[in-house]
Amino acid sequence: MDTSTHTHHASHAHAAMGGSWSGAARATLHCLTGCAIGEVLGLVIGTALGLSTGATIVLAIVLAFAFGYALTLAPVLRSGVALKAALAVTLAADTVSITVMELVDNSVMLVVPGAMEAGLDTVLFWGALALSLAVAFVLTVPVNRWLISRGRGHAVVHGLH
């Protein structure tokens, strides 16, 4: 994809999404889905295996990025974009959003007393995890709105549709 095509698609997507709060919320919900799958899986595996807090968080972050990217990469590839270009679009679309989401949700998990040490069978663990993802969503929507309003983030992906 050449630069002029990319710019055209990005500006078209920006116009379609309008940098609106609803467009940003949809982009963030998409990001949250992948992040939540990886985050929950990582925290559950780390907690079940008795990993340290640090190792559990690293596992959760790695899986959140993997699932977040996968949920964007698959449809981009299905749209006919070559793998190298699809990877570039995916990284451009999701990296900032996933990074913000992961910083926020893991910070919340760390500040809720006992959340990381709580067992998988406790309300504390699941309540803190739900809270962390909700706070991450709320704080990431403005980031995605800002990105989309500039033709970046998920506007890049929507330009391919």
Image (spheres, grey):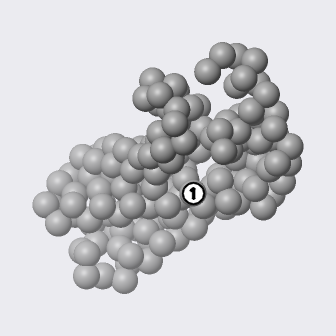
Query: Left or right of 135: which side holds 20?
Result: right
Q: Residue at x 36, y 68 (%)?
A: 115
Q: Amino acid at mark 1?
A: His
Query: Left or right of 58: which side holds 98?
Result: right
Which residue reaches farthest front?
80
Above/below status of 33 relative to 82: below
Total tally of numbered discs in the picture: 1
Q: Residue at x 70, y 25 (%)?
A: 6
Q: Residue at x 36, y 55 (%)?
A: 38
Query: Left or right of 49: which side holds 150?
Result: right
Determine the secondary structure under disc 1.
helix
Q: Residue at x 15, y 60 (%)?
A: 50
Q: Which residue is mark 1?
A: 30
Taking depth in this image into account, of 113 and 158 the one nearest to the observer is 158
Residue 51: image location, x then y, percent: 17, 54
Query: Left or right of 109: which side holds 15?
Result: right
Which residue reaches farthest left?
49
Taking depth in this image into account, of 145 and 151 the one nearest to the observer is 151
Residue 103: image location, x then y, percent: 51, 46
Q: In which quadrant of the rendered view does residue 41 lie?
A: bottom left
Neighbourhood count class around disc 1 (C-alpha, 10 Å): few under 14, some 14–19, many 20 upward: some
Instruction: Pick the quarter of the image with the N terminus.
Output: top right
Residue 73: image location, x then y, percent: 47, 42
Residue 150 visible, this angle: no
Taking depth in this image into account, of 37 and 72 the one nearest to the observer is 72
Residue 89 visible, this angle: yes
Q: In which quadrant of the rendered view does residue 95 lie?
A: top right
Instruction: Pick the quarter of the image with the C terminus.
Output: top right
